[in-house]
Image (cartoon, rainbow, N blue to C red):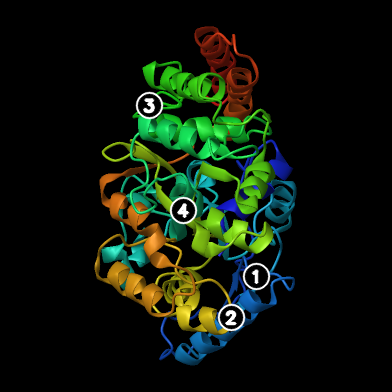
Amino acid sequence: MRTTSQRRALSLLLVAGLGLVAASCGSGDSDEPSAQSSGGADSKVTITVGCQPPKSNPKERAGWDSDVAEFQKLHPNITVESKDAFPCINPDTFQAKLAGGTQEDVFYVYYTDVQKIIKAKQAADISAHVGDVKALADLRPDVQSVFKDGDKTYGLPRNNYNMGLVYNRKLFSQAGLNPDAPPKTWAEVQEAARKIAGLGAGYVGFGEYSAGNTGGWHFAASLYARGGSMVSEDGKTAAFNSAEGKAVLENLKQMRWNDNSMGSKQLLQWEDLMRMMGSGKLGMMIGAPDVVQSVNNDFQGKFEDYGVTAVPESEGKASLSGGDGYMFNPKASPEKIKAGLLWLEFHELTPGKGQFDYARSKEQGRPVGLPIPDLYGDSKPGQEIVALRKQYATVPVEHFTPYVTAQSRITNKLEPPKAQELYAVLDVAMSAVLTRKDADIDKLLSDAESKANKILAKNT
């Protein structure tokens, strides 16, 4: 699974964002033999599928290849040709694949790009065939809706997550806080941050980004949790210059300058907070549950030291969410679409199989127990997946309980249009309140709104 943190790191490298100017066109050759979607048919069909794990990730690649072999035994008339281009989707190469006719029959996509692709008519309408996917009835409606336009469906999800509050349970205990009762409000975050910063020199109660588009990204996460919006409903104007937007910045300014609980080092980007969390000196940060995995794997942290809860005050409101999935080449034949749906149901949506084969993940030494992806909520398949995670867990699943129990009361809300450009604008406001004690929040938001409106006007 491509983690949230991996995606964020990639997006920072691409800077201008992962929004696609165009998507998908290509490899459904007209002379390809037709086939039925079931293994019992006489004819054969070959499908190309994107996002096979790269050779640099041998464990996940071996799992994928094993799944292809198992799937083809179940459906002997379907051949899956895996494509391992890394990254799975890249604005720098996407247009070339489109023009050259080499786009996969079943191609990988981020949630934020789905509607652009649909509106550009660069993905197949799979409505006539998706009803055969048994898992569809149990998928979370908000997750399904990502790939819909009206009553038409254009793809299926692979991953779904929303942001949370990652915290150091060890520091909570040292500061006299209960690690099993993390903050639910920003006032509680502020109080906990003060106590953690009071542990001594070098301890930071709450860390926040303010550079490289990451500041604006986390501004959006905090804004959504307070009930605010980044843009108007029609996406044409900015909406963050609001009481909720002002509260985000005022809270940070208070913690930074009055409480001194955020440390003096600012203008932080993605890797900075990850390194601080891994060092054991940072108490809290906004992040999805896979932050804990990245901190453990890449920044010398330990799974057992961390917990995750919902973003404060997001219950009953919203949380910045994201994910990825697959769409279909508009030139793909009905037979290819049917075969592709069978593969996606097997590999991405079946408890105990494909990405949910937690027994295999544990055997390979990969972490099991993170509460993502959350595709099913509390439906029967969702309960089966949760049970399998607990059965094969290699990480303390109870440390994610506050995050999990809050999900039914939180609405997932996607990133805004022109997300990376808006985030860059709001980096200015975030950095200002964290580096200047006299920062004028009203003016910062007004200036950001003016710039954002110009950006959004180009999108219409």
Rendered residue at 44%/69% (across/down): 369
Element marked by disc 1: loop
Residue corresponding to mark 4 = 169
Location of residue 441 with respect to 230 vertically, above or below: above
Q: Mark 1: few, some, or many residues within 10 Å (few <14, many ≥20)?
A: many
- Disc 3 to disc 1, how far (Cα)? 37 Å
Residue corresponding to mark 2 = 63
Residue situated in front as seen by the camera: 409 or 367:
367
Question: Residue 284: where, in percent of width, then height?
Answer: 50, 43
- Disc 3 to disc 4, how far (Cα)? 29 Å
Nearer to us of marks 2 and 4 is: 4
Rendered residue at 56%/19% (across/down): 257
Rendered residue at 59%/15% (across/down): 451
Question: Residue 370: where, in percent of width, then height?
Answer: 46, 64
Q: Are marks 4 and 1 in contact (CB under 8 Å)?
A: no
Q: Which mark is residue 53?
A: 1
Q: Which mark is residue 228?
A: 3
Location of residue 190 with respect to 247 vertically, above or below: below
Residue situated in front as seen by the camera: 176 or 86:
176
Q: Earlier in the sequence, mark 2 or mark 1?
A: 1
